């Protein structure tokens, strides 16, 4: 399969170029020339398949001509080493738990798949691969875990100073080895702009053999489509679910749209954001106005210029009406989010993190408007990653911290200060 730039469909590359170079030279994003569709035979038996078998079928539909089946199966089996269960809070109100991986966030699915796919693509290349990633919270930790001590790779993580939780920061800064963390005096959007500037410097990109682990990279999105299909088959036969997706850079929702295009019966998607409500505003008005991000307690969603919006537009042929038919947008502020954390705990005895709480609020609002709907809210991170918020709402020590997170608490933070000046950043990279 070939992949083209969203800015220039005539710019087409193969899988290796799309994944390892990550970003087209025209600052678009790569999309498959055509989105694959799974046949009726798959949908008839998908309830009997394992999570790994679903992943292998989907990945083969996207990459099968370029990656041998045995290699792809090994990549999938190594990626899907943990489950994504659907939990029912009450009839019609369901939660898809995506935090059972090593870093307790949904980003583990994409990061683990990407690390394994890149290792296969570079198996005959003796050059060092430099993985560049901007994070607003969970992406950096997942990428650091997936690539830590992987031979032939070094990882540079950019994160906004003072805008991630303490335990999230330790996941970025405490591993050492081939992981370097840059503490940027700015927002996530500034971090993302620095990453893109490095890729658009073609000489620098080639010299450092740069690749991205952000959701600008297509390899992050394909494995995230696996769990939409896995979630749907956990629902009663014949139920078409409404997927409610807490959203920041909109990679997760784009992956859901990929699953829909594959043939997954979906009733609707709801994009749930915090006060960084650029996309809900677009879905309401038809006008897209990116703006500086605002800091909130659901920090991984603090994105004012979501990269994957252009992929969403491409999927719907740049038709606002078509997108609006399939996707609705809702947003909620911090006070509403805090109240939701308390309400879910009080009513359902379930601890939900700030991002999932935003999604749950949107799901609740949707069901009030559509009483017969069954919603699946994506719970994207374990609440233990946000102790300050959870302690404030549910009481100190109310959330048990899993061992794989607790062991990081006493480790020393190691980060390098960085400005938002693109030239300063590129000079630092060039001197690595």
Image (cartoon, rainbow, N blue to C red):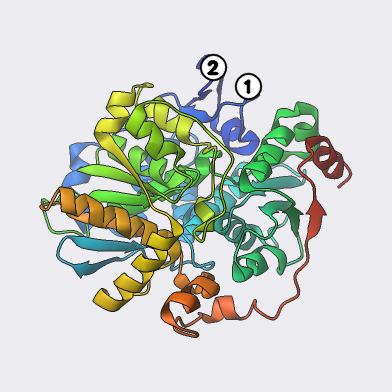
Q: Residue furthest top?
A: 10
Position of 420 with respect to 321 (left or right) is right
In this view, the residue in front, 328 or 266, is 328
Q: Which residue is labeled 1 in the image?
A: 26
* Labelled disc at residue 8: 2
Identify which residue is drawn at 42% across, 37% down.
279
SS for dot 1:
loop
Crowd class of label 2 (few under 14; some 14 to 19; many from 20; radius 10 Å) = some
Identify which residue is drawn at 54% across, 30% down.
29
Above or below, comparing residue 226 to residue 5 in the picture? below
Above or below, comparing residue 417 to residue 340 in the picture? above
- Measured Cα–Cα span from mark 1 to mark 2: 8 Å
Identify which residue is drawn at 76% across, 43% down.
420
In this view, the residue in front, 119 or 303, is 303
Above or below, comparing residue 87 to residue 194 in the picture? below
Check if mark 1's residue and mark 2's residue have beta carbons within 8 Å: yes
Res 364 quadrant in image? bottom left
Residue 187 location, x and y as percent?
A: 65, 48
């Amino acid at each position: 399969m070939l992949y083209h730039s969203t800015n220039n469909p005539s710019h087409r590359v193969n899988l290796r170029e799309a994944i390892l170079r990550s970003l087209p030279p025209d600052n678009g994003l790569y999309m498959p020339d055509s989105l694959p569709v799974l046949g009726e035979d798959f949908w008839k038996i998908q309830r009997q398949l394992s999570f790994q078998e679903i992943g292998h079928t989907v990945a083969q539909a996207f990459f099968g001509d370029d990656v041998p089946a045995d290699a792809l199966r090994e990549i999938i089996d190594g990626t899907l080493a943990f489950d994504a269960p659907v939990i029912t809070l009450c009839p019609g109100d369901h939660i898809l738990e995506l935090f059972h991986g090593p870093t307790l966030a949904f980003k583990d699915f994409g990061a683990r798949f990407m690390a394994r796919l890149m290792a296969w693509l570079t198996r005959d290349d003796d050059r060092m691969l430099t993985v560049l990633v901007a994070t607003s919270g969970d992406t950096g930790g997942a990428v650091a875990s997936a690539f830590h001590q992987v031979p032939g790779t070094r990882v540079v993580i950019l994160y906004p100073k003072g805008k991630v939780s303490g335990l999230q920061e330790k996941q970025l800064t405490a591993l050492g080895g081939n992981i370097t963390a840059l503490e940027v005096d700015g927002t996530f959007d500034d971090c993302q702009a620095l990453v893109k500037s490095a890729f658009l410097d073609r000489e620098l990109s080639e010299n450092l053999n740069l690749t991205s682990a952000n959701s600008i990279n297509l390899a992050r999105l394909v494995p995230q489509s696996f769990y939409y299909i896995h979630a749907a088959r956990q629902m009663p036969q014949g139920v078409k679910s409404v997927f409610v997706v807490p959203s920041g850079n909109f990679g997760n929702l784009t992956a859901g749209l990929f699953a829909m295009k594959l043939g997954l019966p979906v009733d609707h998607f709801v994009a749930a954001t915090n006060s960084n409500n650029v996309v809900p505003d677009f879905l309401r008005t038809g006008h897209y106005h990116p703006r500086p991000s605002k800091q909130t307690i659901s920090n991984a969603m603090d994105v004012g210029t979501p990269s994957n919006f252009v992929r969403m537009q491409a999927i719907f042929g740049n038709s606002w009406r078509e997108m609006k038919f399939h996707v609705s947008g809702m947003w909620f502020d911090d006070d509403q989010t805090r109240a939701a954390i308390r309400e879910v705990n009080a009513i359902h005895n379930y601890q939900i993190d700030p991002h999932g709480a935003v999604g749950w609020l949107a799901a609740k609002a949707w069901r009030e408007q559509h009483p017969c709907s069954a919603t699946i809210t994506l719970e994207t991170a374990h609440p233990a990653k946000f102790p300050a918020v959870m302690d404030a709402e549910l009481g100190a020590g109310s959330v048990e911290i899993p061992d794989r997170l607790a062991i990081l608490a006493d480790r020393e933070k190691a980060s390098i200060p960085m400005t938002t000046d693109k030239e300063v950043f590129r000079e630092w990279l060039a001197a690595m």
